[in-house]
Image: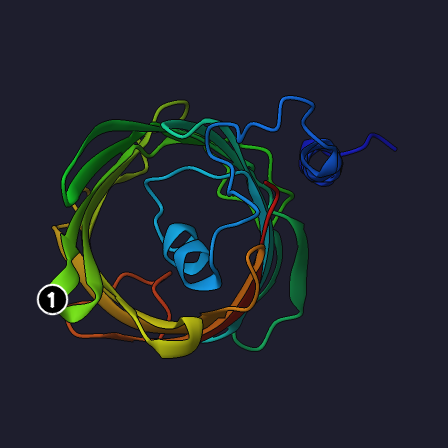
Amino acid sequence: MPVPIPSLALAATLALAAASAYSQDQPDPAGATQPGQTSQTMSAEDAAKKRLDPTDFQSRFESRYEHQALHEGGTRTLFVPRLEYALSSTLALRLETPYLWNREDGRPYDRGFGDLVVRLNWRALRGDGYALVVGPELSLDTGEKGVGFDMTVFQPVVFGLIDMPSIQSVFFPSVQHFVDIAGKNDVNMSLFRTSLLTRLPNRFYTYFEPSLYVNWRDDNKTAAAFELEIGRVLTSKLAVWVRPGVGIGGNRIPFVPDWNLEIGFRYFLD
């Protein structure tokens, strides 16, 4: 029986994460801190601030588990391991390969690996209190029957950072577009987000993320979602979070859930 591509991708993700963690744990003969690495002498508060900056790329492995109650009935559950490997503080490669459990209302589960997602993040601009990241991304048609989307989607994202030190917050506006590039042009959709990350005492944080989906292909249908992440940077290398969300309004796009709940962890490899 052939091994599916996402299985190989998951194995590669775990192997690369382990190799990166091992190499970063080895002493540097020159005693220098490499680009994207955190100095061992950095305070816990400074480390937490660095870890919460998605425009300062740092090699990390993370995993999230999410349960969704779908608008058209049924449920979807995802386990998503992700590796982001920082080639430098301005360039990073991201790889994720989800495992899904889908259940339409009144039918048995479909389960298996979903589509492999690959992104290259590039920080194009950075100044005093602002940054801009461009991320070309591909969702490849590698998912198993019943859980994959049966298409290859080009889904580039652009997001900015605006520092708001007076309220210990950072604002992240973003836009992402999805288009089918190797099928029947079944996807033509945009996602607009305005996210606010607020740093709290003792390395806690909140991340409020409203999202608006616009499906340009199907009569400009829309769907809105609101998620609130509550997390904590536990150590200089480990962060955890929980994220509830709700979908509301508009004429609703079927895959946007009525509600969802996500938990996850992130381990930094520098």
- Picture coordinates of residue 15 (x, y %)? 75, 35
Which residue occupies the foreground of this view, 238 or 248? 238
Tell whether 164 sits left or right of 16: left
Query: Where is 162 relative to 107, above or below?
Result: above
- Picture coordinates of residue 240 (x, y %)? 54, 67
Query: Where is 243 relative to 118, above or below?
Result: below
Q: According to the image, what is the colour scheme of the structure?
A: rainbow
Which residue occupies the foreground of this view, 235 or 250? 235
Q: Report which quarter residue 129 is drawn in.
A: top left
- In terms of secondary structure, where does tag 1 sit? helix
Tell whether 113 sits left or right of 203: right
Query: Where is 226 relative to 20, above or below?
Result: below
- Picture coordinates of residue 61 (x, y %)? 60, 47
Query: Where is 235 relative to 105, above or below?
Result: above
Residue indicated by mark 1? 166
Q: How many marks?
A: 1
Q: Residues within 10 Å of mark 1 (few under 14, many from 20)?
A: few
Give the residue type that dot 1 points to.
Answer: Ser
Visible in this render: residue 269?
Answer: yes
- Picture coordinates of residue 36 (x, y %)? 46, 34
